[in-house]
Image (cartoon, grey):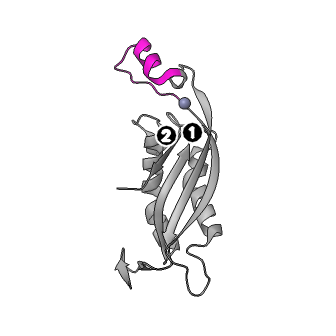
């Protein structure tokens, strides 16, 4: 049981329901941000966003977990080459975010609230097509982004 779906010529992905497995890579970045809605008063911003509304910015140690789902390639046993996945995440995402101000320095966050949710959605848009280019047997399944060890979001695309 399985299917091959053509994505963008000549890329395609081959999958079977059996042996579906999930492969993850964790990467790290430090970044500053401020959550602030300019149409609200300073008091309301502080009430809603707490310390994240601090006028002079503040930083977080982010952890990004990228999970690719698929079947092992019969030739390598890999769903995706994790060395390739790691260098892709670093060049396309981490280098653009690490030691940056998310509100000011990051082109794909322009005019968006620099929330963990919005960052994750933008990272998905970047990584999903690139992962399809480097893996015939795997597709991006989910992203988990930790803003703090206790606060994180999961995104499954869509
Ligand atoms: Zn914050």
Residue at numbered disc 2: 116
Residue matched to label 1? 147
Image point 49% across, 33% down: which residue?
A: 103
Query: Residue 9: in sight, yes or no?
Result: yes
Left or right: 52 as drawn, with respect to 121: right
Q: Does the closest atom of ligand 1 sit within 8 Å of the Cβ of label 1?
A: yes
Question: Is the residue 12 above or below the residue 92 in the image?
Answer: below
User: Is residue 47 in the magenta section?
Assistant: yes
Position above or below: 119 against 139: above
**Region of the chain picked out in magenta, as a range:** 34-50
Q: Which quarter of the rendered picture does the C terminus lie within?
A: bottom left
Q: Quadrant of residue 47?
A: top left
State the separation of the CA atoms marked 1 and 2. Answer: 7 Å
Question: Considering the numbered disc 2 on the image, is that residue within a helix, a strand or a loop?
Answer: helix
Q: Are marks 1 and 2 in contact (CB under 8 Å)?
A: yes
Instruction: Kindly identify the residue that appears in the image at 51 percent across and 28 percent down.
Output: 34
């Amino acid at each position: 049981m399985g299917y091959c779906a053509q994505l963008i010529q000549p890329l395609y992905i081959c999958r079977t329901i059996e042996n579906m497995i999930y492969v993850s890579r964790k990467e790290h970045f430090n970044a500053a941000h401020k959550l602030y809605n300019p149409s609200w008063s300073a008091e309301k911003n502080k009430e809603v966003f707490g310390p994240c509304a601090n006028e002079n910015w503040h930083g977080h140690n982010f952890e990004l977990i990228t999970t690719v789902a698929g079947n092992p390639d019969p030739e390598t046993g890999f769903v995706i080459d994790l060395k390739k996945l790691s260098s892709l995440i670093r060049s396309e995402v981490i280098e653009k975010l690490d030691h940056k101000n998310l509100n000011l320095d990051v082109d794909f966050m322009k005019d968006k609230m620099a929330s963990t949710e919005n960052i994750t959605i933008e990272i998905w848009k970047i990584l999903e097509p690139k992962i399809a280019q480097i893996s015939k047997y795997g597709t991006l399944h989910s992203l988990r982004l930790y803003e703090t060890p206790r606060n994180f979001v999961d995104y499954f695309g869509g």
